[in-house]
Image (cartoon, grey):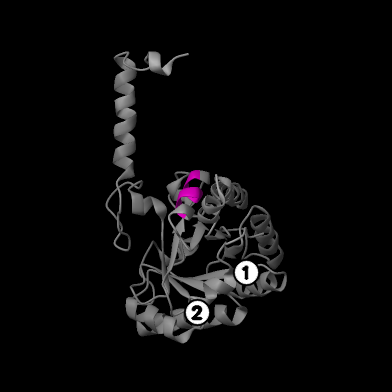
Amino acid sequence: MALPNTLTVPQFEARKGNLPLVVVTAYDAPQGRLADAAGADAILVGDSLGMTTLGYDSTLPVTVADMVLHTRAVSRGQQARAIEKNSVEDAARGARHALLIADLPFGGYGVTIEDGVRAAVDLIQAGAQAVKVEGAGEITLATIRRLIDIGIPVMGHIGMTPQSVNRFGGFKVQGKSEEAAESVLRAANAIVEAGVFSMVLEVIPATLAARITEAVPTPTIGIGAGPFCDGQVQVLHDLIGLTDGPTLRHAKRYADIGSSLRDAVSAYAADVRARRFPTEENSF
């Protein structure tokens, strides 16, 4: 159940063509609390946690149990922010704002409709207000319809869908040829027909993203899809410098928390070894 002042799915949909929607990932309680406090419109508990948090090379090993655990943690972080208040004014500022969306992971749907429904129910019971699914296959479309029938809003995801990385032969731009672009556009129309309230467009040409955004009635949320979508989503770790290697082309690093974290632990280690910590001030 959404807390008071949480952005609702209908409000999210109504932003189509208006003020761009800000979506960011989060994977634990502190991240959920801080992303919400920063003013994100939606927080995605992404199966990208496989790479950002669990150390995997892809999203494929992530389980429904993993997603439930991290969804619950992010939800609790948002709720903790909502109750951290000392006055009515503080309460108004502190109330949870972001819509919480959770990914259905690989293997948690797409095999049978029943599997997808069970996994989605688990995520909603863990605190999500909506779930996200990748692709537009026959069973996925049927699962979207069934979830909506039982009251679970669904965000779609087309283009470069990371759960299909083996089929694509790596993380590659999708929809570059006219034939491939038409295939992505058909997928967009299919998931709209199935009932999604919005869709992620990942790593496709900006011109194709603009065509889809113009063609569909639901908000498009881009990641590596150019500036013409109705909103953008980014992985938190890419934004704050907690990933190894160069910044991805579709991301922008706004802080270097990784270096700050390393420096802090290094300074702590030096103080312990030099017996500068703990001091009398840190003792009882």
Quarter of the figure with residue 203: bottom left
Q: Is residue 31 visible?
A: yes
**Is label 2 in a helix, a strand or a loop?**
helix
The answer to which of 225 and 73 lies nearer the viewer is: 73
Q: Main secondary structure of the magenta part?
A: helix
Percent position of residue 5, x then y: 57, 62
The answer to which of 179 and 113 lies nearer the viewer is: 113
* Direction left: furthest residue: 246
Picture residue at 36% right of the left edge, 71% below the top:
225
Counting labels gives 2
Please state which amino acid type lies under the numbered disc 2.
Answer: Ala
| Residue 60 shown in magenta | no
Camera-near label (1 vs 2) is 1
Q: What label sits on residue 117 in the rendered view?
A: none
Q: What label sits on residue 153 in the rendered view?
A: 1
Mark pair 1, 2: CA separation = 16 Å
Q: Which residue is mark 2?
A: 188
Pointer 1 with pointer 2, Cβ within 8 A? no
Q: Residues within 10 Å of mark 1 (few under 14, many from 20)?
A: many
Q: Is residue 62 visible?
A: no
Percent position of residue 53, x then y: 46, 45
Q: Looking at the image, tell me whether mark 1 or mark 2 is earlier in sequence order.
A: 1
The answer to which of 185 and 17 lies nearer the viewer is: 17
Percent position of residue 72, x then y: 60, 49
Magenta region: 30-35
Q: Residues within 10 Å of mark 2 (few under 14, many from 20)?
A: many
Percent position of residue 283, x then y: 44, 15
The answer to which of 63 and 99 lies nearer the viewer is: 99
Quarter of the figure with residue 233: bottom left
Please state which amino acid type lies under the numbered disc 1.
Answer: Pro
Relative to 123, 201 lies left or right:
left
**Is label 1 in a helix, a strand or a loop?**
loop
